[in-house]
Image (cartoon, rainbow, N blue to C red):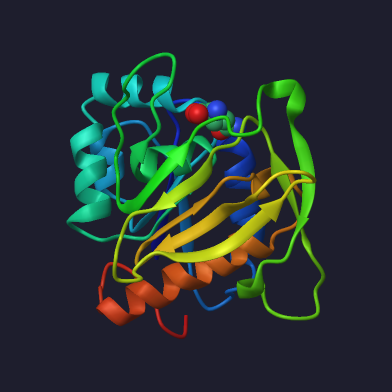
Amino acid sequence: TITVGVLALQGGVVEHLALLHRASTSYPSVTFHFLEVRTPEQLSLCDALVIPGGESTTMAIVARRLGLLEPLREFVKIDHKPVWGTCAGLVMLAEEASATKQGGQELIGGLDVRVLRNKFGTQVQSFVADLNLDFLGEGEGPFRGVFIRAPVVEEVMDGDGKVKVLGTVKKPGEEEDIVAVRQGNVFGTSFHPELTGDVRVHAWWLGNVVEALGQRGEGKGLVVGK
Ligand code: GLN
């Protein structure tokens, strides 16, 4: 069984769980268990983790209070388990977030990038854009990217190409912005695939989880040929 957690302190938890369940049917030979994570004990049961959208300052404060911040850093940066952050989750997974009015905030880190929070403005400036996400494969059409007070990656800070840019968006009259990145076990998207009916990004990510656990040969993980 592969246990996949969704950090459930705040934000879009049930939406992710619903799409993860649907996406898991793409891997009929693997048994998945999905878990809401609110404690270090629950986190320790997980082979992989989704950090949902919401509000990253709040999420960090609650994580600190529950004693989850250090275990989360270990999960990502020492254990190198697969983690995917959407929107506020991407902010949490960045090594740096641009200064905000609220001042500094604690982050988990793992992606050598600096994010700019709320790049496109407030809630009312939310928008949808068709994205060409090459990693989803050819021929299935663009992915509808839902952007809600979304951050963007404003700088990739690693010098040696470990951070892969997987998606960009270009709003009329604006520069192209980086909205999907991956560095090893850590994946981040500015947009919200869990708010679409489109299961492709979840299915792709679960495929990566299966592969990563298989490659690391962790008995706790994969049940081959079940
Ligand atoms: N603006 C939020 C933040 O910086 C993220 C918004 C979202 O997750 N939809 O944390």
Ligand 1 - quadrant of the structure image: top right
| 66 in relation to 158, above or below | above
- Residue 11 visible at all: no
Residue at x 80% of width, y 46% of height:
172
Asked whether, in this view, residue 51 is left or right of residue 19, the answer is left
Asked whether 196 or 162 is in front, the reply is 162
Please, which residue is most extreme toward the top here?
Answer: 102
Asked whether, in this view, residue 75 is left or right of residue 130, the answer is left
Residue 22, x across and y down, in percent: 67, 58
Asked whether 191 or 49 is in front, the reply is 191
Residue 185, x across and y down, in percent: 35, 64
Please, which residue is most extreme toward the bottom here?
Answer: 225
Residue 68, x across and y down, in percent: 25, 32
| 7 in relation to 170, above or below | above
In the picture, residue 91 is in which quadrant?
Answer: top left
In the picture, residue 184 is in which quadrant?
Answer: bottom left
Residue at x 43% of width, y 67% of height:
209
Asked whether, in this view, residue 46 is left or right of residue 142, the answer is left
- Residue 103 visible at all: yes
| 200 in relation to 171, above or below | below
Residue at x 40% of width, y 14% of height:
102
Residue 171, x across and y down, in percent: 75, 46
Q: For the N terminus, give its image quadrant.
A: bottom left
Q: How many marks?
A: 0
Residue at x 20% of width, y 59% of height:
79
